[in-house]
């Protein structure tokens, strides 16, 4: 005998849910409980799919950036797939226990898992505020422990290997991809741009060697002089498009993925355990070690908050380093306090 299911409709949408039993009597009791709970609740039942759609509609009305919307769409796709497998149709059936089980299916780890949980909590805060559910089942879920990734700028020797590996990059479809990759590396190294902003950079963003741009991630304005080496490499790219590294025809996410793959292959040829973001670190650390203030570096990186810059780069500030060394040496001369 097959397990029994309950079948009903919510706002015209057919809902089916397995009851986890083959006993008809037990199934009737469970169905009655579901019916009574629904009648007793002052909140009309909402499907998981409808809740996700309402959140996205509200997010668009609040003009969230496409990068944020994309993350929510990915999360909702997983929630819907999980709910379908578990036979969950209504939002109020996504209990805390269910969400903990859902989280255990994630392949994310470290900081990415923490950020994903923040998205999940934001979704359920919205659902609670919009009275789609009576209480927030994600509220008490604790964030995972995050191990901070050490900032590792590239050395001069590593940069030489990287540029050599760029020259060895195969070309494609009549384009000199090696020259483009070298230019992209130099641009990121000497401006600190994230790969998303760099590989979609339009030519009209640079005037007389000065780059002005509103960053895609933070929505902050940056204004940076472009190093002569990077400017020379950019000028050598044929003007077949309004962009340096993009035709403008594909989606922004697509071109970013293509160049990320090119970077992975390039780092492999160079024999370096690298990532495109390390070029941004190299730019920031180089400025700090040359005496640039943390506040100025923060502005150049487009950070919204100085604390973000301090978190990642304060260890590379000469003044802080010298102060710490002075404190240790001073302790040698003073007797211990009792």
Image (cartoon, grey):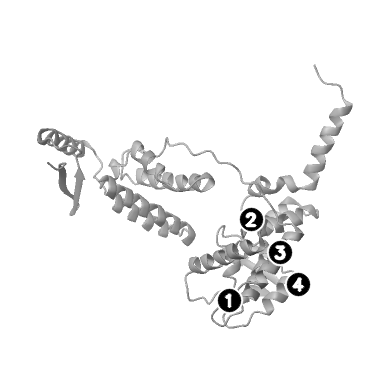
The numbered mark, 4 or 3, whose residue comes first in the sequence reads 3
On the image, the x and y values in percent for residue 193 come to: 64, 62
The numbered mark, 2 or 1, whose residue comes first in the sequence reads 1
Bin the neighbour count of mark 3 within 10 Å (Cα to Cα): few under 14, some 14-19, many 20 and up. some
In front of the other: 144 or 123:
144
Q: How many marks?
A: 4
Give the residue number, with chain letter if any, for mark 4: 228
Q: Residue furthest top?
A: 338
Give the residue number, with chain letter if any, for mark 1: 243
Give the residue number, with chain letter if any, for mark 2: 273
The numbered mark, 1 or 3, whose residue comes first in the sequence reads 3
Bin the neighbour count of mark 2 within 10 Å (Cα to Cα): few under 14, some 14-19, many 20 and up. few
Q: Which residue is drawn at the image coordinates 32% and 38% (left, top)?
A: 95
Q: Can I make out residue 113 in this image?
A: yes
Q: Nearer the viewer, mark 1 or mark 3?
A: 3
The numbered mark, 1 or 4, whose residue comes first in the sequence reads 4
Quarter where residue 334 is shown: top right
Residues under numbered marks 3 and 2 in contact, where contact means CB atoms less than 8 Å apart: no
Give the residue number, with chain letter if any, for mark 3: 161
Q: Secondary structure at mark 3?
A: helix
Q: Nearer the viewer, mark 2 or mark 4?
A: 2
Residues under numbered marks 2 and 4 in contact, where contact means CB atoms less than 8 Å apart: no
Mark pair 4, 3: CA separation: 20 Å
Mark pair 1, 4: CA separation: 19 Å
Mark pair 1, 3: CA separation: 27 Å
Mark pair 2, 4: CA separation: 27 Å
Q: Which residue is drawn at the image coordinates 68% and 64% (left, top)?
A: 162
Q: Nearer the viewer, mark 4 or mark 3?
A: 3
Residues under numbered marks 1 and 3 in contact, where contact means CB atoms less than 8 Å apart: no
């Amino acid at each position: 005998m097959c397990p029994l299911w309950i079948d009903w409709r919510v706002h015209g949408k057919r809902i089916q849910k397995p009851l986890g039993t083959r006993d008809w009597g037990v199934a009737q009791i469970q169905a009655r409980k579901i019916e009574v709970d629904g009648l007793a609740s002052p909140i009309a039942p909402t499907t998981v799919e409808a809740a996700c759609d309402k959140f996205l509609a509200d997010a668009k009305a609040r003009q969230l950036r496409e990068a944020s919307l994309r993350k929510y769409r990915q999360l909702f796709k997983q929630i819907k797939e999980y709910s379908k497998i578990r036979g969950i149709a209504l939002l109020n059936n996504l209990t805390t226990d269910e969400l903990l089980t859902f989280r255990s299916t994630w392949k994310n780890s470290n900081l990415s898992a923490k950020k994903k949980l923040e998205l999940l909590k934001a979704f359920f805060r919205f659902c609670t505020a919009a009275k789609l559910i009576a209480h927030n089942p994600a509220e008490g879920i604790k964030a995972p422990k995050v191990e901070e990734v050490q900032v590792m700028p590239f050395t001069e020797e590593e940069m030489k290997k990287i540029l050599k590996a760029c020259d060895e990059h195969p070309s494609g479809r009549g384009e000199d991809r090696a020259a483009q990759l070298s230019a992209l590396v130099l641009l990121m190294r000497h401006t600190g741009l994230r790969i998303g902003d760099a590989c979609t950079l339009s030519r009209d963003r640079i005037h007389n060697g000065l780059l002005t741009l509103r960053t895609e991630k933070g929505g902050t304005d940056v204004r940076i002089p472009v190093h002569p080496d990077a400017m020379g490499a950019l000028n050598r790219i044929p003007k077949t498009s309004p962009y340096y590294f993009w035709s403008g025809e594909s989606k922004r996410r697509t071109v970013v993925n293509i160049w990320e793959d090119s970077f992975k292959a390039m780092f492999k040829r160079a024999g370096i355990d690298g990532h495109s973001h390390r070029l941004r670190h190299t730019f920031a650390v180089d400025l700090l070690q040359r005496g640039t203030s943390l506040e100025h570096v923060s502005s150049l990186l487009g950070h919204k908050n100085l604390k973000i810059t301090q978190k990642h780069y304060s260890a590379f500030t000469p003044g802080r380093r010298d102060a710490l060394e002075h404190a240790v040496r001073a302790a040698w001369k003073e007797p211990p306090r009792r």
